[in-house]
Image (cartoon, rainbow, N blue to C red):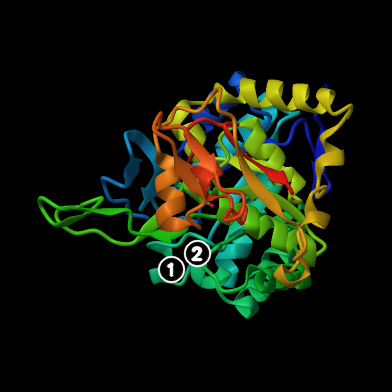
């Protein structure tokens, strides 16, 4: 299957891109990723040498939930602490060895001069595209960088236009979800003349407190700070940001946030993304997940009779509207497949204490729907441990 998809005028061999992260922290790592099948990568965010970067450890902590390890992840990582000179050499080598692959340099700076110098240097080294991080929620904002730019439309427009003026290659602005209205910021990017947006960077968070020691995690010699949350729990936030931007601003979008499977990636494309990036999933499972992503998307497109991912982009957007516009006449009712019901009572308890008391349980523990009481809210379908056992049917 031909999975090529253009993004900001650059043809990507497939829509999957490694996001700026520790997985793209050196040229050697990106080479291994390319050898494993990735065809594009955003290099870990870099800055000019004047910008001193001092990292802290530990910088990563997982959110465990009901036995599942690393459901989500918080980090207090900063940008790369490697000199831009080394990155320039890495970019040159990557482009020489993998001329068909797309190399995107992620940059960050604290002044017009530094933005433009970083942009010119990575362009000179051969980068195909620049991604500007206006979005890191921790550490960098204290120094006037990262999400303080992406949280202000005026700063976003001004800074993006500096970078755009400095180079000829396409410029993408990476946005933060930690704003009241991401559409406002995407409009500012459009006004700046930049070519696209990447949504989203991590969600500002505090993942937990060790109740034995009462220390916040990750604990750096007893102290911690708010970090950036990533992984599957932020997917709904990212998907919403992508859809909102796609519905309101005519600009190319790279979707990122919680993508783990090809199905997640398809959802981002249906919501309007022309490119999909992955970070946490790769950090957890390794570069080899690219094989499943490519195979899965290929089979999916074939099953839909499609010959390119192009047809997916934005296809679900007409199905999103204002709450006011939703039908008040549509009526559904819950239905239980008795054959596969585990009779564990979860639907009964949820409906009793969080719904409309529409489920009764008989002596053999089999739940029954009281159709007169059921409003079709969907709670029982969501709590049932067996997918397909409880469904909603149109009345
Ligand atoms: C440890 C870590 C380091 C990251 N470093 C960067 C970075 O240097 N630049 C950047 O733009 N985003 C960075 N990100 C954000 C990711 O690129 C991505 O936007 C975010 O993690 C959401 O995607 P995910 O849920 O697939 O991880 C980092 C994320 C993590 C977890």
The one of 306 and 177 positioned closer to us in this rendering: 306
The one of 137 and 384 positioned closer to us in this rendering: 384
Residue 204: percent from the left, percent from the top? 43, 61
For label 1, the residue is: 141
Q: Residue at x 14, y 56 (%)?
A: 222
Whether the residues at callouts 2 and 1 have beta carbons within 8 Å, the answer is yes
Q: Residue at x 66, y 75 (%)?
A: 158
Q: Vertically, is 327 above or below 324? A: above
For label 2, the residue is: 146
Q: Is residue 155 visible?
A: yes
The one of 145 and 93 positioned closer to us in this rendering: 145
Q: Vertically, is 225 above or below 45? A: below
Residue 359: percent from the left, percent from the top? 49, 46
Which element is circle 2 on?
Answer: loop
**Circle 2: is it few (<14), some (14-19), or many (20+) Cα within 10 Å?**
many
Q: Residue at x 57, y 52 (%)?
A: 236
Residue 296: percent from the left, percent from the top? 69, 24
Which element is circle 1 on?
Answer: helix
Q: Vertically, is 180 above or below 305? A: below
The one of 109 and 244 positioned closer to us in this rendering: 244
Q: Is residue 197 visible?
A: no
Residue 1: percent from the left, percent from the top? 82, 21
Q: Vertically, is 332 above or below 155? A: above
Residue furthest to the bottom:
154
Query: Which label's residue is closer to the chain start, 2 or 1?
Result: 1
């Amino acid at each position: 299957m031909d999975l090529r998809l253009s993004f900001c005028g650059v043809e990507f061999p497939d829509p999957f891109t490694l996001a700026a992260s520790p997985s793209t922290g050196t040229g050697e790592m990106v080479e291994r990723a390319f050898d494993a099948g990735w065809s594009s990568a955003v290099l870990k965010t870099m800055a000019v040498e004047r910008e001193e970067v001092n990292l802290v450890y530990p910088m990563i902590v997982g959110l465990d939930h009901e036995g599942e390890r690393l459901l989500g992840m918080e980090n207090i990582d900063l940008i790369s602490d490697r000199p831009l000179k080394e990155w320039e050499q890495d970019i040159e080598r990557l482009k020489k060895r993998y001329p068909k692959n797309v190399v995107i340099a992620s940059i960050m700076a604290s002044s017009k001069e530094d933005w433009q110098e970083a942009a010119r240097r990575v362009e000179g080294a051969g980068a195909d595209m620049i991604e500007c991080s206006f979005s890191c929620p921790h550490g960098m904002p204290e120094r006037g960088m990262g999400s303080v730019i992406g949280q202000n439309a005026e700063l976003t427009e001004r800074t993006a236009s500096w970078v755009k003026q400095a180079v000829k290659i396409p410029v993408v602005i990476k946005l933060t979800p930690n704003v009241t209205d991401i559409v406002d910021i995407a409009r500012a990017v459009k006004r700046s003349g930049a070519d696209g947006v990447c949504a989203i960077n991590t969600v500002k968070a505090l993942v937990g407190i060790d109740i034995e020691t009462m220390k916040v995690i990750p604990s750096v010699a007893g102290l911690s700070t708010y970090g950036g949350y990533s992984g599957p729990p932020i997917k709904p936030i990212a998907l919403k940001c992508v859809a909102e931007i796609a519905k309101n601003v005519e600009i190319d979008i790279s979707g990122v946030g919680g993508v783990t499977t090809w199905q997640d990636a398809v959802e981002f494309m249906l919501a309007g993304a022309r490119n999909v990036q992955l970070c946490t999933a790769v950090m957890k499972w390794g570069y080899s997940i690219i094989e499943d992503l490519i195979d899965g998307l290929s089979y999916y497109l074939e099953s839909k009779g499609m010959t390119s991912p192009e047809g997916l982009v934005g296809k679900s957007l007409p199905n999103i509207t204002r709450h006011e516009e939703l039908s008040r006449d549509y009526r559904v009712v819950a239905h239980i497949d008795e054959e596969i019901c585990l009779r564990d009572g979860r639907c009964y308890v949820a409906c009793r204490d969080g719904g409309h008391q529409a489920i009764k349980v008989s002596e053999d523990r089999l739940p029954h729907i009281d159709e007169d009481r059921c409003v079709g809210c969907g709670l029982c379908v969501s709590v049932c441990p067996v997918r397909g056992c409880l469904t909603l049917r149109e009345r």
